[in-house]
Image: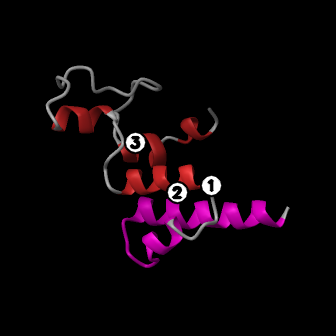
Amino acid sequence: MASQSIEAKWWSLVWANMASRSVKVKVWSLIWANMAPQSVEAFVWQLTQGRVAVKIELVRRNMMTYDPTKCSLCNCGDESVDHLFVGRFKVWRV
């Protein structure tokens, strides 16, 4: 039970930092603090580095045309890291 509260606090700090874009908390120490599975830490690190293959990044790298960048889940905005993982709470329920 205690590990769940630690993990919840970890995620809360990471998401708060990503959403506010402030550097109040050292993101790197949070990401690599061994509080989550290594695969989760690696994925969060990729998120903060813009290395996740969302449509906006694929367009930026000329791997995809601009037309289909709408979010596949909601069709409300462009599919970016911020849109999918910070602004769209619908994704968290999936």
Q: Secondary structure at mark 1?
A: loop
Mark number for residue 14? none
Task: Point out the stretch of residues depicted in magenta.
Answer: 2-31
Q: Main secondary structure of the magenta part?
A: helix
Q: Earlier in the sequence, mark 3 or mark 1?
A: 1
Name the residue rendered at 68%, 62% in the picture.
Answer: 7
Inspect the image, locate mark 1, and give the three-letter code of the amino acid beneath it: Pro
Name the residue rendered at 51%, 59% in the picture.
Answer: 15
Classify mark 3: residues with Cα within 10 Å, few (<14), some (14-19) or many (20+): some
Inspect the image, locate mark 2, and give the three-letter code of the amino acid beneath it: Glu
Name the residue rendered at 41%, 65% in the picture.
Answer: 20
Where does label 1 land, which residue?
A: 37
Residue lying at the far left in this picture: please name it.
62
- Nearer the camera: disc 2 or disc 3: 2
Figure quadrant of the C terminus = top right
Mark number for residue 41? 2
Q: Residue 26: say if magenta.
A: yes
Classify mark 2: residues with Cα within 10 Å, few (<14), some (14-19) or many (20+): some
Which one is nearer the viewer's eye here, 76 or 54? 54
Q: Residue 44: say if magenta.
A: no
Where does label 3 land, which residue?
A: 83
Q: Secondary structure at mark 3?
A: helix
- The picture places residue 8, in percent across and down from the top left corner, at 68, 61
